[in-house]
Amino acid sequence: MPLSSALPRLRTALAASLLTLAALPAAAETVGKVGVDWIGNDIYIDAVSDPKISGVTCHVTYFDRSVIDRLKNGNWFEDPSNNAIACRQTGPVTIGDIDLSRGGEEVFKSGLSLIWKSLIVTRVYDKKNDTLIYLAHSRELTDGSAKMSISTVPLYGENVTWTSGKP
């Protein structure tokens, strides 16, 4: 096969790979770690950028149990569901192709246990109030948790670019 006919296929494969990566939930960057007691329990602070909305950063906190605490309480494989979130505009806002349904879209996920529990950040767009809502909550296989935290980023009066046109 000549190189000139292979290049379009290579470009298509590369574009498909990049789109797949863009659809993955955001990765977090740990920006803080605060010790809370003498046995080694810590609160971590992660910065999470929305993968489909540039210019918005969420800071998520979560509790990390120490080995001593795990031994003492007998619960080896999971951390508590306690978390908090604060999201702000941190640059010019450009909104890509986001899920506009009431259920929103998962933008971040991190394990809180070996396999059963995850910390999730879900984004919902409130069209009537022109606001992005970010909900941090835990997802468990068997028992859902009522512990949650919410943060909003109002878009009213802001210069926002919608790549697919404002809904």
Image (cartoon, rainbow, N blue to C red):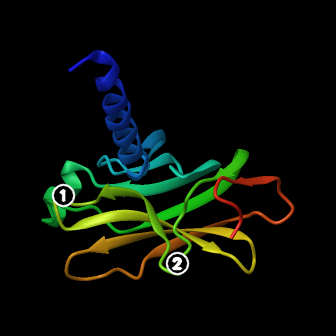
Percent from the top left, x then y, of residue 17? Answer: 34, 40
Amino acid type assigned to the residue bearing label 1 in the image: Arg
Percent from the top left, x then y, of residue 102? Answer: 53, 81
55 relative position to 138: left or right: right
Which residue does the numbered mark 2 point to in the structure image?
A: 101
- When the figure is inspected, residue 15 is found, relative to residue 85, above or below; the finding is above
In front: 83, or 124?
124
Q: Residues within 10 Å of mark 2 (few under 14, many from 20)?
A: few
Q: Are marks 2 and 1 in contact (CB under 8 Å)?
A: no
Q: Residue at x 47, y 79 (%)?
A: 103
CA gap, disc 2 and disc 1: 40 Å
Amino acid type assigned to the residue bearing label 2 in the image: Ser
Q: Residue at x 35, y 80 (%)?
A: 145
Q: Secondary structure at mark 2?
A: loop
In front: 112, or 160?
160
Q: Residue at x 40, y 53 (%)?
A: 25
Which residue does the numbered mark 1 point to in the structure image?
A: 70
Percent from the top left, x then y, of residue 54? Answer: 62, 46
Q: Secondary structure at mark 1?
A: helix
Q: Specify the quadrant that holds the C terminus.
A: bottom right
